[in-house]
Amino acid sequence: MRQYETALIFDAQLEEPEFDGELKKVVGLIESNSGQIVKTDHWGVRKLAYPIRKRPQGYYVFLYYEAPPDTPRVIERALRINEHCLRFMTVVPEFPFDFEKPEETAGDRKSERAPAPAPKAEEAKPEPEPPAPEAESGPEEAKSEESADESEEAKQ
């Protein structure tokens, strides 16, 4: 079975029981075609970028599921004739689903990076160059050193 992600935008004016009924129809189609729902992600009511069927808002839902290759065609055919579904899109994700792991927080990521081995960090740092002896300095550097000495004497 392949993995699919289907994005659905339903009419935002639907009542909660009607919306649940429409979503159960889609889930039922997936399961009746020997598919299995992995995750359902409800984004809720969002403003659309442009009106669709004269509606400024839509209710976004994302379904992640595993199903045989002919299942998305069956679902999309049913969604095309569903007047409450404003838009839909089914894609095959690039990477496999991995919803078992809890989402990391910023604190978790910092604690994982903290125990870095010390020798590797020292190797990455370039060593500072030793100061050049005065004999090797050019005439411009000598003039700047003399002017610094003169300014110190003037302050005293």
Image: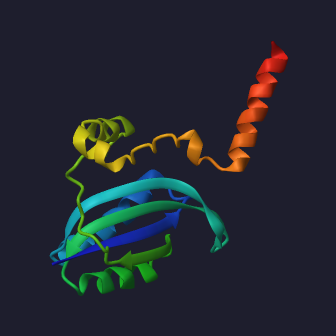
Q: Residue 122's quadrant in the figure?
A: top left
The residue drawn where x is 51% and y is 40% is: 131
| Image height of 38 relative to 141, above or below | below
Q: Nearer the viewer, residue 139 or 62?
A: 139
> Left or right of 47: which side holds 107?
left
Q: Nearer the viewer, residue 113 or 91?
A: 113
Image x and y of residue 126, in percent: 39, 48
Image x and y of residue 31, in percent: 20, 71
Instruction: Report the quarter where the N terminus lies.
Output: bottom left
Q: Does residue 80 appear in the picture of this structure?
A: yes
> Left or right of 34: which side holds 97?
right
Q: Nearer the viewer, residue 155 or 106?
A: 155
The residue drawn where x is 37% and y is 77% is: 90
Q: Which residue occupies the extreme top position in the image? A: 156
Q: Nearer the viewer, residue 141 or 24?
A: 141
Q: Residue 113's quadrant in the figure?
A: top left
Image x and y of residue 19, in percent: 43, 59
